[in-house]
Image: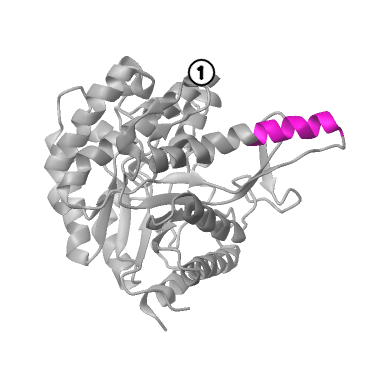
Amino acid sequence: MAFPDGFLWGTAASSTQCEGAAPRSDWHRWEQLGKAPASGAGNGFATEYARDFAMLAEHGLTHHRLSLEWARLEPEPGRHEPSAVEHYRAVLQAARDAGVSPWVCLHHFTLPGWFGDDEGGFLDDRARGYFWPRHVDWVAETFGDLVAGWMPINEPVAYAFGAWLMGVFPPGRTSFEDFATGLRNLHLANHDAWRLLGGHGAPVATVMNLMPLHPAVRSRDVRERDAAEAAFELVEDVVWRSWTGALRDGVLRVPGTTPLEVPEMAGSFDLVGFSYYNAASVYAGMELGPYPADATVTAMGYAPWPEGLGVVLHRLADELPGRALLVAECGLGTSDPTTEDSGRVRYLDECLGQVQGALDDGIDVRGLFHWTAVDNYEWLHGYDVQFGLFDRDRRPRQSAALARRYALGP
């Protein structure tokens, strides 16, 4: 398989997952309450970052997305921590020195406690409209000279779902009204970040969690089928239509909120980036299940389906014609690192085949970032699920060799 010159071969991770929860973050408090496994020091990236970047560069993985943890940089409102600034500048410089281009995420599921709890986080219009832009501006001024690209907010739908509908992320709400408000404000915050970061010379990409969706039933009852179709349409609106419509025509339509005209959202972002892990069946009660429905699921609860990546790429090309696309996350989590990397090898190989097929069809796909480089903390699963091309001792797996062959050639 031949990929175009300049194709971005990369990896991705977040601060909490590779450095452990920041002491002043809402996730650290979440762990203390026993609502998530302890993250500890993550996978050691805070001290091993220079070694990690050299390892990635050696494998041709010369782009890496990381998050600069807001709770470390600004543990109290208006007070920035010099040691955290120094640390993250050293991390970004080490990436540059190793020949790795760093892409920076500003919100990857965790927030400073003072913002998320005291100020209402992204549920509060003032917090979203004042504290968030202030932070974006400050990060751009402080680190922008070292940043190759920006991915401001990671997976708005997944975060809103976990924080305000399922209650498995802080603040632990279970309200559709809060979910709708929070998701709308996350999309607006992401747009604000694009607007503020766009003048700094580096490209700005989305990271939307996308999946093909299929209505599904468990019986032959016509009423259940009708309910499944209605649930499917609602989930489609949440996962796809709300934000693709905004990027196409400047109207943000989040279910449960009034449509909002934001003309400058049309055509925003330099790259339409997304994560892909699975497809999903949508049942009558709006619960999601694996697709295909009878497929074997992983420890993460979903069925790996490489063909779905091709479906996502072609749908994006249809709905947002002419836009440059980026696979910002793609990977396979396994629960047995000694035997299951062969599955990761097959999955990665088949996913890259889907990307090649999209390129052959004339779709402008700019790169693929593998989730993740080194095994790290996986939120509700702790360290029981492994996504890495390398284990926590930095030993390369067969999948790392495969990635290297694609990136560097035979």
Q: For the magenta stretch, what is the residue range?
A: 221-232
Query: Residue 300 in the image: x percent, y percent?
Result: 59, 46
Residue under the point 32% across and 34% down: 263
In depth, the one of 91 and 41 nearer the eye is: 91
Image check: 220 left or right of 5? right
**Picture layout, residue 239 above or below residue 43:** above
Callout 1 crowding tier (Cα within 10 Å): few <14, some 14–19, many ≥20? some
Residue 374 painted magenta: no
Query: Residue 321 in the image: x percent, y percent?
Result: 43, 54
What amino acid is at disc 1?
A: Glu
Image check: 404 left or right of 22? right
Residue under the point 40% across and 26% down: 260
User: Residue 370 appears in which quarter of the rendering?
Assistant: bottom left
Residue 229 painted magenta: yes
Residue under the point 87% across and 37% down: 220
Q: Which residue is mark 1?
A: 177
